[in-house]
Image (cartoon, rainbow, N blue to C red):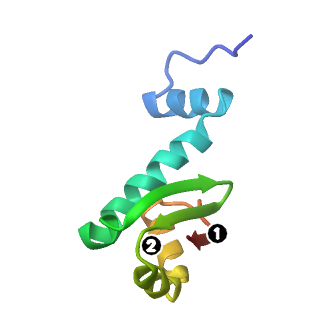
Amino acid sequence: MARRLNNESSVGDVLKQIIQTNKLQPGIDQIAVKEAWKSLMGNGVNSYTKNIALKGSTLYVELTSSVLREELSYGKDKIIAMINEELHREVITAVVLR
């Protein structure tokens, strides 16, 4: 049975406990990474982005433009740093562009 929380806990602490108990963090990370990609890359890249998936700590991005894929492949480290900075913790360690 779930541990009873103190009545004086903050809402943030209660939510963290619920996320940890129910193992919801991977799903939350998946959504957060998609939103970070959309906001950081802008409309130009997003118009060529077909699918975004986070599996473990690897971000898989499916693109419809081979030219854009080649350009982004040069900046993988910067993409990782930008998304992790946006999420305020290290979620992504690798990016695979397809």
Number of marks: 2
The residue located at (56%, 40%) in the rendering is 27
Seen in the picture, residue 70 relative to 41 is either above or below; the reply is below
Residue 90: tell me if it is visible: no
Q: Quadrant of residue 45?
A: bottom left
Coordinates of residue 62 in the picture (x, y in percent): 50, 64
Seen in the picture, residue 55 relative to 25 is either above or below; the reply is below
Element type at mark 2: helix
What residue occupies the far top of the structure in this picture? 1
Q: Amino acid at mark 2?
A: Met
Is residue 44 rendered to the left or right of residue 1?
left
Element type at mark 1: loop
The residue located at (55%, 54%) in the rendering is 53
Coordinates of residue 24 in the picture (x, y in percent): 60, 34
Q: Which residue is mark 2?
A: 82
Quarter of the image for the N terminus: give it. top right
Tell me which label, 2 or 1, sits earlier in the chain: 2
The residue located at (64%, 69%) in the rendering is 93
Is residue 4 rendered to the left or right of residue 7?
right
Q: Which residue is mark 1?
A: 93
The residue located at (26%, 72%) in the rendering is 44
What residue occupies the far left of the structure in this picture? 43
Q: Nearer the viewer, residue 9 or 93?
A: 93
Q: Quadrant of residue 68?
A: bottom left
Q: Nearer the viewer, residue 6 or 89?
A: 89
Q: Amino acid at mark 1?
A: Thr
What residue occupies the far right of the structure in this picture? 1
